[in-house]
Amino acid sequence: MVAGDRKDPYKSFRFLVEITGLVVGGFSEVSGLEVETETEEYREGGVNDCVHKLPKVTRHPNLLLKRGLTDSDALWKWYRQVVGGRVSRKSGCLILLDDTGGEKWRWTFKDAYPVKWSGPEFKGDTGTVAVEVLELAHMGIGKG
């Protein structure tokens, strides 16, 4: 391997979040980027050295989006619509950037809507940023 061929992993602090129809600013943290397929074990008669694992349902956990609280209340308003019985589903993407700011990976999520909003914790003895968290249910994550 030549020294110039080295492939370093991408850094997780360089990312963007886009949600169709919302201008919400930058997020400080995103979690829940997962896909998991359940399996069912099946024992075949006469085969004693292994157990077959058959795929069942695939699940996509909720996404958690965290950001510093600002004057933009677009996320709060979106969640309040759900509380009021008006579910507005939105698609979006999570974009991983390289050190130069170029896009390297893109994951899309579809038909998302907020299922939980959490406001900041207030503590008089610290100078930390007030953070809001939005939890999104969605219909799946794809690459591209």
Image (cartoon, helix red, strand yellow):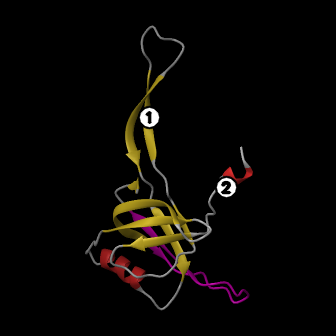
Residue visible at 44% across and 59% down?
Answer: 107
**Which amino acid type is marked by label 1?**
Thr
On the picture, is 61 further left or further right than 22?
A: right
Residue visible at 34% across and 57% down?
Answer: 139
Q: Nearer the viewer, mark 1 or mark 2?
A: 2
As measured in the structure, the alpha-carbon distance from the residue carrying label 1 to the one carrying label 2 is 34 Å
Q: Can residue 6 be seen in this view?
A: no
Front residue of this view, candidates 10 and 133: 10
Front residue of this view, candidates 135 and 1: 1
Q: Pointer 1: what residue?
A: 39
Residue placed furthest toward the top: 46
Task: Give the extent of the magenta segment.
Answer: 117-137
> Within the image, what quadrant is residue 24 found in?
bottom left
Percent of width and height locating residue 29: 57, 70
**Which amino acid type is marked by label 2?**
Asp
Front residue of this view, candidates 5 and 26: 5
Q: Earlier in the sequence, mark 1 or mark 2?
A: 2
Callout 1 secondary element: strand
Percent of width and height locating residue 46: 45, 7
Percent of width and height locating residue 38: 44, 39
